[in-house]
Amino acid sequence: LPLVPLKGLRVRPIRREGHNQNMRLLYDVMEEGKPRADRVLRTYGWVLAAILPIVAYLAWGKALERAIGGPKAFGVGVALFVWLVVVLVRIHNGDKAFKAAGQAQQSAASA
């Protein structure tokens, strides 16, 4: 995630090849330019929403353990980790774009 995004690309997904480390994403570049401020701020907002609860737990975890007890504090930590994963999956949804493009191509080919 760049600190100051200078360039943005609007792409149309074609297909996804491979899995995990050997994955290649094929796409057409439709438009280049500066990214819109609202999209940049929304992305940074999601990142902060994911990271700030974890940072707060790490900073005040000992006080939380003393206040509510060890097992409950551990449960809060697990819930915050699940929150982190949910938010990060929400940010990175590129697989949905390629899945939708593949379905659109299949339906166009069958018509």
Image (spheres, grey):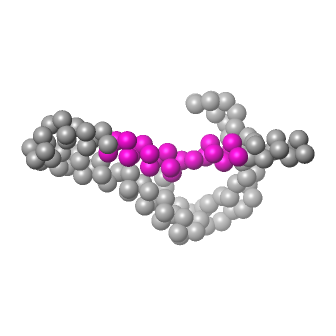
Visible residue check, residue 53: yes
* Horizontal arrangement in the rendering, residue 110 relative to residue 29 (left or right): right
Extreme residue toward the right, this view: 111
| Residue drawn at point x = 38 percent, y = 46 percent | 83
User: How many numbered callouts?
Assistant: 0
Question: Residue 106: image x %, image y %?
Answer: 82, 41
Whether 92 is among the magenta residues is yes
Question: Residue 80: image x %, image y %?
Answer: 32, 45
Q: Main secondary structure of the magenta part?
A: helix
Question: Residue 3: image x %, image y %?
Answer: 45, 59
Extreme residue toward the bottom, this view: 37
* Horizontal arrangement in the rendering, residue 91 relative to residue 55 (left or right): right
| Residue drawn at point x = 69 percent, y = 42 percent | 99
Question: Residue 98: image x %, image y %?
Answer: 69, 44
Visible residue check, residue 14: no
Residues 78 and 57: in front is: 78
Whether 44 is among the magenta residues is no
Extreme residue toward the left, this view: 66
Q: Quadrant of the C terminus?
A: top right
| Residue drawn at point x = 12 percent, y = 40 percent | 69
The span shown in magenta is 80-100
* Horizontal arrangement in the rendering, residue 45 relative to residue 9 (left or right): left
